[in-house]
Image (spheres, grey):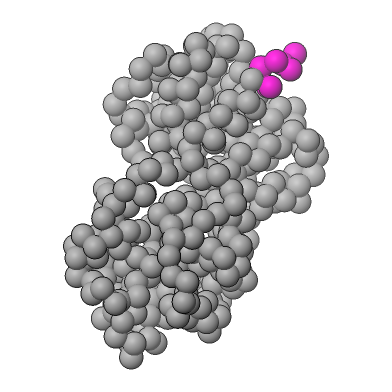
Amino acid sequence: MKLALIRRQFSATGGAELYVQRLLGALASAGHETHLFAEKWEGQAANVQFHSVKADGSRAQRSTRFAQAVDAALQQEKFDCVFSLERTLKQDVYRAGDGLHRVWLKRRKQFAPWWKLPLIGLGAFHRHMMALEARTFDPANTRHVIVNSEMVRGEIAEHFPAFPQERVHLVRNGVEVKRFQNVDRNAARARFGLADDDFVLVFVGSGWERKGLPWLLQFMAGRTADPKLKLLVVTRDRMRGKVPPNVILTGPLPDVETAYAAADLLTFLPIYEPCSNVVSEALATGIPVITTAFNGASELIDSGVNGHVLDDPRDLDTLGMCINHWQVRDNAGKISTRYPLDLETNVQHTLQVLELAAKTRD
């Protein structure tokens, strides 16, 4: 199979690109000829032919310009399957890893303060993104779609009902499970200055508004009377306002697995996440997760078994009750999940969709 893979920005060392790296490796191992179309890339990937795609213009124009440039570049060769990880003009398979831009704007309006509401969604950038998204989900332009959660599948059905549901395939995210299972917990806790009897929450992510960190900090500000409750915050975001004394800021960590190993519970309260990897990473570590129903990864959670799911990230009372459940439980120890978390399963299922698309191509 001669495959074109589209990824606007590619890094052979970036953690977010691990999925692409593994997929490229699996394709090469299976004997497929793989071409990567990207605006820019870092590092090298063995047995992959790179195609540089230039996209100039303003921030509002860049996504559309890239889609147009890729479309023109693809016309120069014939491929058995075109697989896009970006909103582009024409492809056999599109992976909707970012969810829907229009749903993201809807969630922002739902949770933003009143004075921000008139500004949300304004501007050329959002108009361009939604127009490009509509073209991507036109069944004449895309033959198959991969989603990473049932939540995103439902959003596509609601906002793009013309796209056939039988052509939407669920392939859940995967992580390097072993990476999160081989860290010394005692050493990790010592690194962050944590006592043996501290109960430690961890937050991992960047994107102040989207990931719900303000509500988590507000919760911790109200729990300073509990000297054993601590929160590790792993983020590159600049903090706004005063940080409570029971919050430990680590900054970005190249070895984020140490933060999970030091923690007892992941607390992650996004207003919109198609399927956040941090949930899978925490579950792979063996710690429970509290997240929201606006996170597609909440589908990995069985309430009271490996975590809890909040209907509203602002509901700090329920958050407190859920944290208390895990803080006082008698059967402390590693939890498990009924879904596979490994990256290999993700890559295998993705390959199945690509092969299906190639076999059924006109």
- At x 31%, y 22%, the residue is 44
Work out whether 179 lies above or below 30.
Answer: below
Q: Can residue 6 be seen at all in this image of the molecule? A: yes
Is 145 covered by the magenta stretch? Answer: no
Give the x, y percent position of residue 173: 53, 43
Work out whether 316 lies above or below 287.
Answer: below
Question: Image quarter for residue 178?
Answer: top left
Q: Can residue 126 be seen at all in this image of the molecule? A: no
Give the x, y percent position of residue 33: 49, 11
The quadrant the N terminus occupies is top right
- At x 53%, y 19%, the residue is 4
* Count of marks placed on residues: 0
Identify which residue, 278 or 86, lies in the foreground.
278
- At x 27%, y 49%, the residue is 255
Give the x, y percent position of residue 334: 44, 61
- At x 38%, y 86%, the residue is 223
The stretch of residues the image draws in magenta is: 356-362
Question: Image quarter for residue 303?
Answer: bottom right
Is 359 covered by the magenta stretch? Answer: yes
Give the x, y percent position of residue 274: 57, 51
